Image: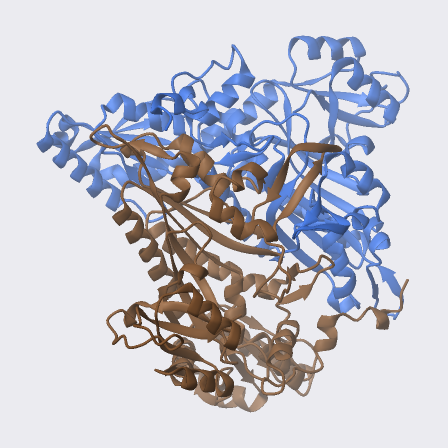
Chain colours: A brown, B blue
């Protein structure tokens, strides 16, 4: 056996110190994940282990989104993880986009396979093979299906939650009778995502359309949610695609319309992933660790009874139990009565990002009061116990709201509008953030801007569609759009 | 484009006729799945598509079991789908058991991999690699983690839900300080499973211990739930393993106990899968299709308004809406007001196994009553609308109970006890079912019985532990156990 001292993990080591954001944001991010026991490294290149504390966030994300999907008429189903290689090749753009990232099974059950199987990087092709069988007439439309599952993309550079070889996600796949219906669906799901990330994850996002070069491989149009992280880099939080008839034609998904004509269906697909947990960390975290928005936090509050002797421990823990029982059922609480000094317990729950800590010391019990400590601001509030339950519920709402407003303010303060290439370069060099700038609409300018500044077009924001279009910052020709640029994850 | 007539699927075709159980049970099973739109074939060998109607059953299974797991202290986490080949080899029995069924990735991201990756057939090895890092001291124990996910086993003969190349399941993995604790955990989870399958899926099961030859590859002891299907063949519904220290030693999962000694942990693992849906179908289904136990059914009841003209349609559908709104929130109902004649609508919901159908015709509305039709018995009950909600809730409970009692009775009637080899062979030949028989405990006798009769030891039932042990039915020597034999899936 190894010596236990030598078995210390990255996670355990990281417990000791979290790098400051200002010193090294990238290391801070990794430290926060380890300190919060959100994820751990795995022996498989680029794959992470999602630890219970991190998975609990994903479960909360799933629970809320799943209800939102069902409320908009979608049902869940499950399709195979393996895709015959030939399927991927049916849609030319699609295979071009995903080929470099595929993991391939060519040996199974002790034999070489006749046709290689790809581990799904996304499921359009395997799902649409079924749709071609299921859809016969206009009566079968719309098909509104979602799948929760894992996908694999062999990424070169990986980072927990943000970009991992395997990740968990949901992918919606719908089929409609008309372009208009599909477009409406794609935008509806973008709005569902926006509502979810704003109201639950407390992220501030810009929604818009992707440029040709950034859209999903095989889509007509990709709509996206883009958010600015604390290091002023952008993160794509989710996408919704109007696939047009591209896949319908490749997979022969046709239907007889009400007039008896055979038509191809119009399709959408849309997804968000465990990457959202990365967005949450990089938006709300501080130098002490992750900060969980209450509505998505594994726990809402933790009681930390404080004592000097056994009798006090018993008494104050009992008081914590009494207060816990007074809370509404939906409030997730925990009593930490471990025999560790209070400071260490505070420290651990701060690192886990629990929105509220309730300190209950001997004086508090005597005075029939508790001390609420906010994770987002550090503020301490003494509350008479008769108001405890009401105050906790109120405080959780205040924290949720504060996190969103803080994120929104950060985004606003770091969104700039420029008209010249000089100003654009200057901003990228000095401040980063979102930069709104007129663009001619040509791939070539977009590529050169990326090459020179590492900034990409995150989207053409919807709310800029009526903005004044002057000259393209790069080529100087008439601008077609106002595009949102940023260096991105 | 193909002609739509030629695009008819297996599912669509099966709509026309379900084979009778008495004629061909195996075909009946496939027909029922197609007719109930539970699953469809996929282009990937041995993989199925779980359609929304089938997936909804799995979601209900997940929801209930997940709560039961959490109520017994378990948390969910997620580990990589890929396992380095070398990991599987660390536990000798384990790799022997799973090697023939592995799917192997040896090419990813455009390159040949240095070490082959196996798509998880079960996750002991990849999970225990993390446990070795996470567990340092007795303070870290017990570790109680569950994972919901997909696994892949390259099976030779596959059948929807019962045995598929990829299937969905949950796998619990725990680590404890002592053998006794691990044993208690393994038995606790077996009891959780038993409670679940009896109370929700309405299955009747025998619980017991697997023989050496049938236990999980790498376990000390495997506990199992065995159920008898309508064709008198047994189906293993779930297993819980006491892994002892086998994996702890292979993966060096040790801890410092309270006295400062370094010890290996004691472990368990336990799982149930989408196979449970197959058990449900083969236990309750009849010649009309699947019969869903109310507590796990996608829908509890469907309203079928009946009309002769538009006015009646409007009136009777409105009455259905009124009745639907009067139901408690937890009752899942649907109004089928499609312009298809009632008979076709009845037919479809019967095939989906919906526990109650509510017929609302013009006469019923006039008399302020509804007709409840039970899926399990076909019985029609006229109910005054003032009692509707109460009666529906009551009737769902009655159906749930009836299905369980019917299953229990079937099992009891088909469980036989024999003392001689002659009687054993006769029973296998004529009746099938569960056969309790004394057994010497030797692998050799077990293997020969299997060879000659295709019957295997399903388990050594717990409730037979104190039974009279006479002579082994095969070798005639002193019996060690009373074993439960059956031909099995």
Residue sitting at 80 percent across and 12 percent down? Answer: B420
Is residue B298 visible from the viewing direction of this image? Answer: no
Residue for point 23% across, 32% down: B338
Quarter holding the C terminus of chain B is top right
Q: Is residue A21 left or right of residue A478?
A: right
Identify which residue is drawn at 42% across, 85% down: A422
Q: Quadrant of residue A214?
A: bottom left
Could you tell whether B120 is left or right of B215 in the image?
left
Q: Where is residue B65 in the image (x, y as percent from the top left)?
A: 55, 47
| Residue B416 or residue B51, whichever sits in front | B51
Vertical position of residue A28 compared to residue B247: above or below: below
Position of residue B402 relative to residue A466, above or below, is above
Q: Is residue A59 left or right of residue B262?
A: left
Image x and y of residue A199, in percent: 38, 69
Could you tell me if residue A252 is visible in this image?
A: yes
Locate residue A80, reporting x and y percent.
55, 39
Q: A477 or A431: which is nearer to us?
A: A477
């Amino acid at each position: 056996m190894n010596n236990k001292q030598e078995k210390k993990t990255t996670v355990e080591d990281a417990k000791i110190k979290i790098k400051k954001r200002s010193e090294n944001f990238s290391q801070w991010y990794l430290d926060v994940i380890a300190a919060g026991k959100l994820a751990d490294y795995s022996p498989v290149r680029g794959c992470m282990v999602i630890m219970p504390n991190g998975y609990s966030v994903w479960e909360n994300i799933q629970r809320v989104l799943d209800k939102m999907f069902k409320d908009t008429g979608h049902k869940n189903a499950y399709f195979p993880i393996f895709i015959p290689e030939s399927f991927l090749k049916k849609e030319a753009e699609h295979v071009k986009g995903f080929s470099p990232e595929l993991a391939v099974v060519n040996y199974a059950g002790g034999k070489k396979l006749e046709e290689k199987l790809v581990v799904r990087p996304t499921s359009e092709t395997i799902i649409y093979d079924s749709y071609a069988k299921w859809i016969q007439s206009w009566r079968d439309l719309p098909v509104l299906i979602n799948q929760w599952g894992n996908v694999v993309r062999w990424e070169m550079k990986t980072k927990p939650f943000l970009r991992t070889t395997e990740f968990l996600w949901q992918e919606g796949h719908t089929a409609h009778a008309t372009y208009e219906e599909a477009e409406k669906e794609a935008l509806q799901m973008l709005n569902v995502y926006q509502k979810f990330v704003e109201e639950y994850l407390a992220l501030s996002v810009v929604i818009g359309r992707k440029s040709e070069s950034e859209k999903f491989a095989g889509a007509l149009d990709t709509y996206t949610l883009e958010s600015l992280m604390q290091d002023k880099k952008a993160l794509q939080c989710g996408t919704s695609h109007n696939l047009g008839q591209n896949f319908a034609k490749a997979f022969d998904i046709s239907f007889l319309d009400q007039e008896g004509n055979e038509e191809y269906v119009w399709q959408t697909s849309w997804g968000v992933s465990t990457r959202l947990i990365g967005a949450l960390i990089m938006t709300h975290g501080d130098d002490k660790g992750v900060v969980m928005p209450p509505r998505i936090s594994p726990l809402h509050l933790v009681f930390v009874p404080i004592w000097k002797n056994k009798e006090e421990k018993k008494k104050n823990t009992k008081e914590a139990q009494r207060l816990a029982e007074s809370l509404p059922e939906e409030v997730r609480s925990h009593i930490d009565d471990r025999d560790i000094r209070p400071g260490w317990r505070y420290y651990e729950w701060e690192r886990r990002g629990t929105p509220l800590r309730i300190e209950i010391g001997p004086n508090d019990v005597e005075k029939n009061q508790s001390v609420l400590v906010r994770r987002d601001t550090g503020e301490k509030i003494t509350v008479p116990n008769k108001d405890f339950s009401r105050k906790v519920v109120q405080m959780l709402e205040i924290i949720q709201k504060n996190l969103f407003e803080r994120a929104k303010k950060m985004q606003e303060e770091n969104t700039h509008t420029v008209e010249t290439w000089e100003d654009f370069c200057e901003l990228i060099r000095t401040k980063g953030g979102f930069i709104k700038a007129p663009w001619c609409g040509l791939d070539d300018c977009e590529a050169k801007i990326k090459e020179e500044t590492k900034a990409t077009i995150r989207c053409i924001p919807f709310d800029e569609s009526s903005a004044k279009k002057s000259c393209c910052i790069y080529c100087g020709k008439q601008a077609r759009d106002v595009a949102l640029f940023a260096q991105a994850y």
